[in-house]
Image (cartoon, rainbow, N blue to C red):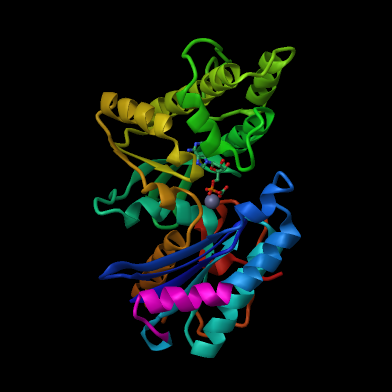
Amino acid sequence: MRVIGIESSCDETAVAVYDAELGLLSHRLHSQIAMHQAYGGVVPELASRDHVRRLLPLVRQALCDAQSDRNSIDGVAYTAGPGLIGALLVGAGFASSLSLAWDKPALGIHHLEGHLMAPLLEPKPPAFPFLALLVSGGHTQLVDVAGLGRYRILGETLDDAAGEAFDKTAKLLGLPYPGGAALAKLAEAGRPGRFVFPRPMLDRPGLDFSFSGLKTAALVALRGRVLDDAIRADVARGFQEAVVETLAEKCRRALEATGHRRLVIAGGVGANRRLRERLADVAQSAGAELYFPRTEFCTDNGAMIALAGCMRLTASLAAGGGGPTRGSRLVAARANWELGDSGADAAAATGV
Ligand code: KG4
Ligand code: ZN
């Protein structure tokens, strides 16, 4: 079983080939960051147009790297949502065309399911069930993962996502978009304890998050100061500590509440070194094992979509339904799509 995966939900065009027996055979990615940087954020129309330009060459390269051709591919997986609708439609339209031309099933994958499955690309993958902290630019959720498509959201952000808070605060610090990784780097030079920001929602029970106030706290701390490198680094450090401590404490509570013995970090903020360190402590204290994807598979990539597609296709064939329809004419994409919706079922991706 071999599946090609296409990711185009935001500002990365990515393609990968995953084989159920051999593992990941190839993955290629083009980042649009340089193109969007001049505007300080993603410009949706530019993103869509660039996906159109990049997809075909990336598919050719990924197939060539994997020493595969259309005959050895059993399915075409693509990100069907959530994300920027124009960007999603480019990937969905492209994947559906391949599916028709190759007479192979198309599989619309939930982007967050891709993130949740990404740790399974590593040599020592977590077994189901596990507790996942999903922290990306658009989402912050604690998810009880019983298996593929069996997700229960235990808590989520009430306003900004953790990555969004990193990006907005990075902007205040004068760092270029997307500032998360740059802020984390700056924080390394900061002095601990120089700025102590609030730990949102730790004073009340539950597993929800709120990060929008933190960026305001950073803004207030910066106001009226001469912004030299030392102050910027100190604020970055204080901000990162506040986010990491909040995430860590909620993970501790969720491990305690669920009794899970496996904790998985997924999504772009999962690349944060400090977060990984703190969650390693939390996992150890709870007697749990910590899992995370390699850095390049924390942020958006095609490998996680190819893997999720391969798992979905395998499961659907095993269920005896003959698998998804070959050459489906449905171009399915949804800008908004809850992970819990019918288990993020690929077939549930409705056309627009
Ligand atoms: O998962 P992802 O690539 O895209 C979404 O699905 O949203 O996550 C991107 C987010 C951005 O907000 C980016 O700033 C953040 O992940 N990020 C980081 C780090 N690397 C990426 N945040 C904190 N520390 C990092 N090292
Ligand atoms: Zn993502």
* Relative vertical location of residue 258 with respect to residue 12 in this rendering, above or below: above
Q: Position of residue 180 (x, y in %)?
A: 55, 37
Q: Position of residue 138 (x, y in %)?
A: 61, 44
| Left or right of residue 188: residue 220 | right
Quarter location, residue 136: top right
Name the residue: 48% across, 58% down: 301
Quarter location, residue 291: top left
Residue located farthest toward the front when viewing the structure as drawn:
228
Name the residue: 54% across, 89% down: 101
Figure disc tally: 0
Q: Nearer the viewer, residue 92 or 224?
A: 224
Which quadrant of the figure contains the N terminus?
A: bottom left
Name the residue: 61% across, 57% down: 32
Q: Position of residue 306 (x, y in %)?
A: 43, 66
Q: Position of residue 333 (x, y in %)?
A: 64, 66
| Left or right of residue 175: residue 188 | left
* Relative vertical location of residue 39 with respect to residue 192 in this rendering, above or below: below
Q: Nearer the viewer, residue 234 or 3?
A: 234
Is the magenta region chiefly helix, strand or loop? Answer: helix
Which quadrant of the figure contains the C terminus?
A: bottom right
Please give the range of residues in magenta: 55-69
* Relative vertical location of residue 337 with respect to residue 315 in this rendering, above or below: above
Q: Is residue 56 magenta?
A: yes
| Residue 332 seen by the camera | no
| Residue 74 seen by the camera | yes
